[in-house]
Amino acid sequence: MQAWLAFPSVDTVEWPYAYLRADSTRSSARAKRADLFKELDQLTWRLEDGRHDALIRVIEDWRAELSEKKLFREPGDWSPAWLMAHPQKAPSVVRVAAIGACEPPDWVQVWDASGVERAPWRGGLTLSEISRGGGPLDLHGAEQVALVTPEGKIEHYGQAAYNYADAELSPGTQVVVALPLGGEAFPWIRDTIATVLAHAAPGDNCSEMALAEEVSVDD
C-alpha cells in the first residue's frame, strides 16, 4: 500500500491494469512457457507428418507472440483498495521487485485456429459478439474457451449448446481456443497459453517503479 503512494502519477492509474513483479514469478512463468514450447514443438512434428500446414503456421504465430512477452507479473488485484481490505494477503515488500501500471488497451485479443488477432474493444462488448456473425473468434466447434482478464484471472466459458455461457469483455481481455483436433494435449495447450498470458503485462504501454534489486536471469 505504501509503495503505491510513491508511484508516479498514481492518481491516473487504472487499477485493473496495475501489477507487481517478483523474481520468483518471472522464473516460474518462463519455465511454464518453456514447457509449452516443447509441447508445441512435438505437436508441430506430428502435424508435419499429417500435412496440416495451416495449423503449423498458427503454432508459429502463437509461439512468436508468446516469445515477445518479456514482462511477467503476479496475477491479481493489487489496488490500494484491495490491499487495504485484505491486509493478510498483501505480499511482503521485500519479495516485490517492482510495481507498475499499463494504459488500458483499446483491444481484445483472440488466440484461435487462425492465429493471434486483436479486435477493437468497445463498451459492452461480449464474448458472443466476437464469436458469432463473422466476429474474429473462430470456435471451430470448441466446447469451451479460456478467458484471461486484465487482472490475470483465468475463467472458462462453455460454448456448446449444453454448457453455453456468455461474458462481457474488458479492454485487454485475451480469449484462447484449443486447436480443432482431438486429444488431451489441446486443452492443456489452451490453458497453458492462458496461464502464460495471465502472468504477462496487461497492456502495451506500461511504466513501473523498482522496489528491490532483481536477480539477473537469462532468457
Image: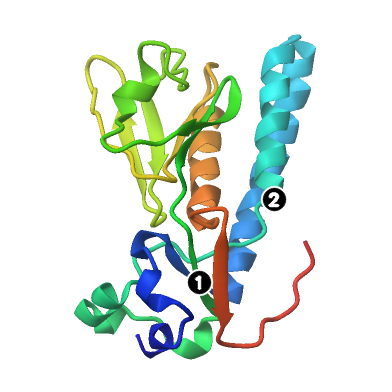
Q: From the viewer's perspective, tell me whether residue 136 is left or right of residue 29.
A: left
Q: In the rendered view of the protein, which quadrant contains the C terminus?
A: bottom right
Q: Disc 1 or disc 2, which is closer to the eye?
A: 1
Question: Which residue is tagged 1?
Answer: 100
Regarding mark 1 in the picture, which secondary structure is present there? strand
Tell me: residue 119, above or below residue 98.
Answer: above
Q: Residue at x 65, y 53 (%)?
A: 69
Decide: few, some or many residues near mark 2? Use Cα within 10 Å; few <14, some 14-19, many ≥20. few
Question: Which residue is tagged 2?
Answer: 34
Tell me: residue 210, above or below residue 159.
Answer: below
Identify the coloring.
Answer: rainbow
Q: From the viewer's perspective, tell me whether residue 96 is left or right of residue 40.
A: left
Q: In the rendered view of the protein, which quadrant contains the N terminus?
A: bottom left
Image location (x, y in percent) of residue 94: 51, 90
Q: Amino acid at mark 2?
A: Ala
Q: Residue at x 45, y 33 (%)?
A: 120
Image location (x, y in percent) of residue 6: 44, 88
Q: Amino acid at mark 1?
A: Gly
Regarding mark 2 in the picture, which secondary structure is present there? helix
Q: Residue at x 34, y 44 (%)?
A: 170
